[in-house]
Image (cartoon, grey):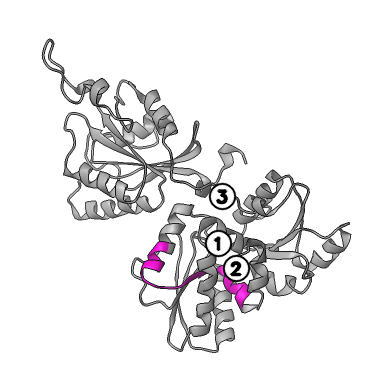
Amino acid sequence: MSLNTTPSSERIHIGFFGRTNAGKSSLVNAITGQQISLVSEVKGTTTDPIKKAMELLPLGPVVLIDTPGLDDSSELGELREKRTKEIFSRIHMAVLVIDAREGVTEIEMQLEERLKQMHIPYLVVYNKKDLLEVKSGGPETDSIEQDKEEKDNKIYISTLTGENIELLKEKIGSVKLNREEKKLVADLLEPGDHVVLVIPIDKAAPKGRLILPQQQTIRDILDAGCTLSVCQPENMRETLELLRKPPKLVITDSQVFSVVKEMVPSNIMLTSFSILFARYKGNLESTVKGAYQIEELKDGDKILISEGCTHHRQCGDIGTEKLPKWILKYTGKEIDFEFTSGGDFPEKLEEYKLIIHCGACMLNEKQMQERIMLAKEQNIPMTNYGITIAYLNGILQRSIEPFQIL
């Protein structure tokens, strides 16, 4: 996959934090070489997190996130601070920007402590080095005496003169990230294997374009040195007959599980895009266990159905229409459903008996793990679309056979 076309969800996310007017926006502009963020002497110019995708070697594709200042005491400032803190759930690394003239305050100390608690690697950047004064012949200030006291995660820079910006980029690139490298499907395959993808034409997808999970799966299969065939459900049987030998794996859109399962022989592994993403972005074993909560549902219980992206809802939408209909039919119970999408996900989950999440192709693994942890802390079972549909169709065990769990 080209670095320039890497989805945001697959990029390393780097958040820039600090007080208002510490120079966060100027620093993001200096690193990108573009006027991404509005810069002004007026405090609070950055009102919402601003993102910029770029390539930063040796890390590769990254997303830089410029956040509002953490010291705005106004009512609007509280909302900005809340949005800033929400960024913690998605970043792999943080850059703490400090005005070198003012030094460290309680705000920076609290932020550092939170980053440590969340095990997020970070750098401390003292900006406005050009404005520091050192008296001739007198003792150097603590801020300037870098050679003696500077740590690996600390650097002094000037966004005005450009001093040490390149060195900072090198430091960012050398930070060891707490990020596990995963494969979407390639680890299930051997070079030369053949895979069949069953892809119904999705009305929600732009004409002439595959949706992101399908694109990523195709690329992962090709990277594994394998071949693949792509067909619609109605061509599935013919596709299998045309192959000289059975495929190693069939991956289907979850919505047509009930049709595809009848055409795929039991000696061929079968799963779905959504189940692949449940493993890739979260914890497959706990997500599978969550599906069994469907058997415990009672009249009046409430289910949260959550999507990681926002899109125009069409007739027959999987999350808001098909899943509720299938669950009501399977259980025969009077169940209430609530829906969230995009960045919206409630912090308090006690009212729900079950959470059903999408495959999270638009969320990075940090965001998805945060949601899983939130549900776990409140003892609320959580599963996902594909696993739920497989369970309702009686083929859950077969669809997770490739992963050797449970």
Residue type pointed to by label 2: Gly
Q: Amino acid at mark 3?
A: Lys
Q: CA distance from mark 1 to mark 2?
A: 8 Å
Mark 3 or mark 2, which is nearer to you?
3
Per the image, label 1 sits on a secondary structure element best described as helix
In the picture of the structure, the residue carrying the numbered disc 1 is 278
Near-viewer residue (372 or 253): 372
Q: Is residue 227 left or right of residue 91?
A: right
Identify the residue at horizontal 23%, vertical 41% (top origin).
19
In this rendering, position of residue 262 left or right of residue 15: right
The reply, left or right, for residue 351 in relation to residue 201 is left
| Figure check: 299 above or below 71 | below
In the picture, measured across the screen, residue 358 lies left or right of residue 238, that is: left
Residue 343 appears in the figure: no
How many other residues sit within 10 Å of disc 1, few (<14), some (14-19) or many (≥20)? Answer: many
Q: Which residues are magenta?
A: 373-391
Residue at 55%, 86% in the rendered image? 331
Return the x and y of residue 139 as percentages of the image width and height. Answer: 12, 17
Closest to the observer, 217 or 335: 217
N-terminal of the pair, mark 1 or mark 3, is: 3
> Which of marks 2 and 3 precedes in the sequence?
3
Residue topped by disc 2:
386
Nearest the viewer among 150 and 244 is 150
Q: In the image, which disc is placed on residue 64?
A: none
Which is nearer the N-term, disc 1 or disc 2?
1
The quadrant of the image that shows the N terminus is top right
Distance between the alpha carbons at the discs numbered 1 and 3: 12 Å
Residue 324, percent from left and from top: 54, 78
